[in-house]
Amino acid sequence: FEALAAFDPDIAGVLTGELGRLRGGLQLIASENFSSPEVLTALGSTLSNKYAEGYPGRRYYGGCAEVDVAEELAIERCKALFGADHANVQPHSGASANQAVYGAFLKPGETILAMSLPHGGHLTHGTKVSFSGKWFDAVHYGVDKETEDVDYDEVERLAREHRPKVILAGGSAIPRTIDFARFRAIADEVGAIFWVDAAHFIGLVAGKAIPSPVPYADVVSFTTHKVLRGPRSGAIVCTEEHRAAIDKAVFPMMQGGPQMHTIAAKAVNFKECATPEYAEYARQVVANAAVLAETLGEHGIRPTTGGTDTHLSLHDLQGVLVTGADAEARCDAAGITLNKNAIPFDPQKPNIASGIRVGTPCVTTQGMGEDEMRRVAALIARAVVDGDADPEHAVSREVRGAVTELVDAFPAYPRPARG
Ligand code: PLP
């Protein structure tokens, strides 16, 4: 770091500034986490220099002996972690992994049935602004108005009506576990491929804190940087039957050279995920999310679906007469980072929204437990209901002071002891 700081103080300043931001506030974005120094070491390594198009033992470049070891370890660890027949660890991100799944199973113009974005799906699940909605015919299901959970009857009805080539489960704002067996049965009835985008919750599956989609799905795509706590990247696991289609779709259909430093970091992360400490962390992420959701509810900030089974909850702010955009700005001013989010059947535009989404991966990695979650909920409620977007407002200062006290007791990336 000293050499970088001497050569490029501007970028060194960004790195230290960001570390200060992570340490100085509460990080509640459900898709973020703090990966370990070991993962970061692999990411910042000379493996970034290497071209290795192809797969281990079948490369288009010489000099791949070392990186082959890294990729083989990542593949084997990923397969063992999820009990999968096959793993492809080359996707650069969650969106790249999804692109490859489309490439493997669909031709342009064919039909996919997926969760709608405003009800909790993802941009790559067939929205018009994404390649997925431009190149494929996307039909969308949503949540049930009463339960606010996936409307399985609607999935079944739309599958029978449209006979999609692929049925996709998963999304970015789904607080509840998904009934994979029901999806599998629907897919079998209409002869569709069953795909799970587990980007958000795969880390809980790795820690055995929630049920796995792997025994049910033909293919599971995911990101590695959310609850899972690895490098910013993606991966795909699938049954033996689809191995060749997935590998060809990742390379050469969608990607060029794999990022070998990131693949090495994924291998490190998969090793971390197999430890008892990781399983305990995953269990605590869920326990923390349940308490955070419940306590926010007690403060009038209602959790949709009545709570959560996972790492995230979605909250309806209409009862406290605050928009999602205002809540996000007020929390920001108070040292709490979270995001506004549309809730199902939201009367507001997406850039205003009536809800917020909160997640517990970061705070759990910091070592916080249920007692701290009650405190965090009270601080969010104070900032959202009584606060202001001005950091100098009395409530912003008050909440920020309490946030500082809390994060100082549970530091992200604790400083090494000197002496
Ligand atoms: N799929 C889901 C369900 C996601 O939530 C996300 C990211 O938030 C992605 C895919 C895309 O991942 P990435 O941002 O790594 O491209």
Image (cartoon, rainbow, N blue to C red):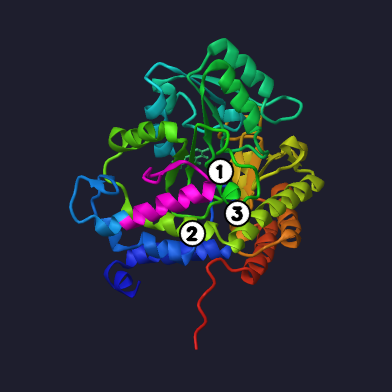
Look at 33% across and 75% down and name the residue there: 2
Q: Nearer the viewer, mark 2 or mark 3?
A: 2
Circle 3 is placed at which residue position?
Answer: 361
Q: Quadrant of residue 190?
A: top right
Q: Which amino acid, mark 2?
A: Lys
Q: Which x, y percent locates residue 161? A: 58, 10
Q: Earlier in the sequence, mark 2 or mark 3?
A: 2
- Which residue is farthest bottom? 419
The one of 274 and 37 positioned closer to us in this rendering:
274
The one of 312 and 196 positioned closer to us in this rendering:
196
Dot 1 alpha-carbon crowd within 10 angstroms: few under 14, some 14 to 19, many 20 or more: many
Circle 1 is placed at which residue position?
Answer: 200
Q: Earlier in the sequence, mark 1 or mark 2?
A: 1
Q: Earlier in the sequence, mark 1 or mark 3?
A: 1
Q: Which x, y percent locates residue 193? A: 50, 25
Look at 53% across and 45% down and name the residue there: 83
Task: Tell me, yes or no, if residue 26 can be seen here.
Answer: no
The one of 229 and 86 positioned closer to us in this rendering:
86
Dot 2 alpha-carbon crowd within 10 angstroms: few under 14, some 14 to 19, many 20 or more: some
Q: Secondary structure at mark 3?
A: helix
Q: Which amino acid, mark 3?
A: Pro
Answer above or below: position of 198 versus 38.
above
Dot 3 alpha-carbon crowd within 10 angstroms: few under 14, some 14 to 19, many 20 or more: many
